[in-house]
Image (cartoon, helix red, strand yellow):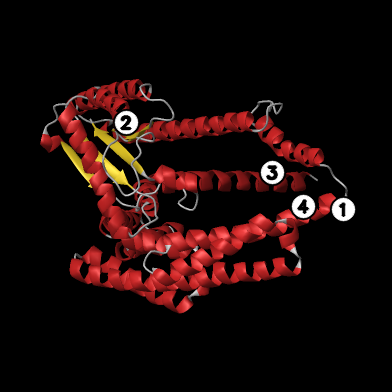
């Protein structure tokens, strides 16, 4: 019995030692791999695996080599050598990715559009060719061969458009036709004629749009998606009406039934839905709550990013010379001033006028309330009051540089959208220069067209959010 106890105690002790050694080993690895892992995560966040495949592949190769060497207990010096090389290549990949996003914005968007409609599944041959050309374009750009990159990018765009076109026809139009044929068999026209007619009309418009302009698939894709949705919607409505008739439900029964989800959603926001005057008021209240939560989430993310930056600086400076510590102190004081001024600017605008955001030290005023007439770039008089507030915000950060960014939704041709966004950005730039003293060298206007959406281009509300002017203040 005594021997048995000794054996059990020895086993427990051995497990404890192994656990302790494992924990220590993990700590050593985390410390050793810290910089390379941070560079790895930064590269992934810029989509370097597809936008900078050459540098990214080399970085991953050295990173995995370091992991294997650590696992096998190789000398730390050789592991560190691999990690230094990996971190360097990850940083190169991040820089190359940002360059690709700047130079190849249209190509990246075209690829994204083709992905959205599952082109890799419905147009395999065109997708494969597009991916080959895309990869070559990115590698050429990494190597500095701009002309070769542009040629491959042009070819890739063509193949992606072909793939997207095929996918739209297969994935949306054909499926919608099948759904409409099903609707005819189930006599949906008798129960949901308006919705069914809308689906037919959208299908015709999508088919026509695809035939007339194969180089701008945003509108036909949106129409095709809506057609499919309305076909499904008509089938659902017809079933609901039939069920209501079978169960002999009254209109009051149906309304009360439809009020239940609104009450449940309101309850989830810790509010009671007052439906005695209809659904409009509680819906507005719920939407306001969601927008507040989104705004709070953005602020939290900004605060986290600021803290990460400050922690990184502290790690770099810690243990350094006194001059460096003084520089850090001044830097932190400057950031505190920026935060205070940011809060001041944030309070200048209502929710319907602008959103005020932060990216590192830059302040972004997203002018939600500044709208232009379709295809035009002149500023209407009713927006002057909002632009006066913008001027006051700019004055809060004296001697700052300014960048006026124009953005559009995805409807319309790529080149036309780039031109229109640039014209609108220039219009705001000229207005600000005429209204206040700004050094011409400290203000720039740039148009991004449809390449930097902040919302879903497939919805009317999302497209409205994407048609915007961003004022970027760089203290």
For the C terminus, give its image quadrant: top left
Left or right of 429, for residue 407: right
- Label 3 or label 2, whichever comes before in sequence order: 3
Whether residue 377 is visible to the viewer of this picture, yes or no, is yes
Residue at point 66% right, 26% down?
A: 271
Kindly give the residue lying farthest to the bottom in the view shown.
125
Q: How far apart are the two marked residues, 2 and 4, measured between alpha carbons?
A: 46 Å
What residue is disc 3 on?
Answer: 9
Residue at point 23% right, 46% down?
A: 423
Q: Determine whether the residue tagged by mark 2 lies in a helix, strand or loop.
A: helix
| Quarter-of-image position of residue 437 | top left
Q: How dense is the environment of label 3, judged by Cα within 10 Å: few (below 14), some, or many (20 and up)? A: few
Q: How dense is the environment of label 4, judged by Cα within 10 Å: few (below 14), some, or many (20 and up)? A: some
What residue is disc 2 on?
Answer: 383
Q: Determine whether the residue tagged by mark 1 lies in a helix, strand or loop.
A: helix
Whether residue 401 is visible to the viewer of this picture, yes or no, is no
What residue is disc 1 on?
Answer: 246
Left or right of 399, for residue 177: right
Q: Nearer the viewer, residue 78 or 406?
A: 406
Residue 159 sits above or below residue 217 on the image: below
- Label 4 or label 1, whichever comes before in sequence order: 4
**In the image, which disc is placed on residue 240?**
4
Left or right of 21, for residue 332: left
């Amino acid at each position: 019995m005594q021997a048995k106890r000794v054996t059990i105690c020895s086993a427990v002790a051995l497990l404890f030692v192994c656990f302790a050694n494992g924990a220590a080993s993990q700590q050593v690895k985390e410390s050793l791999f810290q910089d390379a892992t941070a560079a790895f995560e930064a590269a992934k966040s810029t989509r370097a695996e597809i936008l900078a495949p050459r540098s990214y592949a080399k970085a991953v190769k050295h990173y995995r080599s370091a992991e294997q060497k650590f696992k096998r207990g190789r000398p730390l010096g050789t592991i560190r050598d691999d990690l230094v090389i990996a971190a360097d290549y990850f940083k190169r990949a991040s820089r190359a990715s940002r360059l690709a996003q700047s130079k190849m914005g249209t190509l990246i968007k075209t690829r994204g559009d083709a992905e959205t409609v599952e082109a890799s599944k419905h147009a395999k041959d065109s997708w494969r060719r597009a991916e080959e050309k895309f990869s070559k374009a990115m590698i050429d750009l990494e190597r500095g061969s701009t002309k070769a990159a542009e040629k491959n990018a042009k070819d890739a765009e063509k193949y992606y458009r072909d793939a997207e076109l095929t996918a739209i026809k297969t994935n949306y139009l054909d499926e919608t036709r099948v759904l409409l044929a099903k609707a005819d068999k189930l006599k949906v026209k008798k129960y949901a004629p308006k919705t069914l007619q809308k689906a037919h009309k959208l299908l015709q418009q999508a088919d026509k749009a695809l035939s007339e302009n194969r180089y701008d698939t945003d509108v036909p894709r949106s129409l095709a998606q809506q057609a499919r949705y309305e076909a499904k919607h008509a089938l659902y409505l017809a079933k609901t009406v039939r069920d209501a008739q079978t169960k002999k439900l009254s209109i009051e029964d149906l309304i009360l039934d439809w009020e239940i989800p609104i009450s449940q959603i309101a309850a989830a926001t810790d509010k009671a839905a007052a439906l005695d005057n209809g659904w409009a008021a509680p819906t507005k209240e719920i939407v306001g709550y969601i927008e507040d939560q989104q705004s709070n989430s953005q602020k939290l993310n900004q605060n986290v990013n600021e803290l990460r930056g400050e922690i990184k600086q502290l790690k770099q400076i810690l243990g350094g010379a006194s001059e460096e510590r003084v520089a850090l102190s001044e830097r932190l004081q400057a950031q505190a001033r920026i935060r205070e001024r940011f809060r001041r600017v944030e309070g200048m605008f209502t929710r319907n006028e602008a959103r005020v955001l932060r990216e590192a030290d830059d302040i972004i005023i997203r002018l939600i309330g500044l709208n232009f007439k379709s295809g035009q770039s002149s500023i209407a008089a009713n927006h002057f009051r909002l632009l006066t507030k913008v001027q006051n915000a700019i004055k809060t950060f004296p001697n700052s540089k300014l960048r006026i960014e124009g953005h559009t939704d995805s409807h319309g041709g790529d080149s036309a959208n780039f031109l229109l966004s640039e014209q609108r950005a220039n219009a705001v730039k000229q207005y600000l220069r005429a209204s206040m003293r700004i050094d011409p060298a400290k203000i720039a206007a740039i148009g991004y067209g449809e390449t930097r959406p902040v919302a879903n281009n497939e919805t009317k509300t999302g497209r409205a959010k994407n048609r915007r002017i961003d004022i970027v203040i760089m203290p």
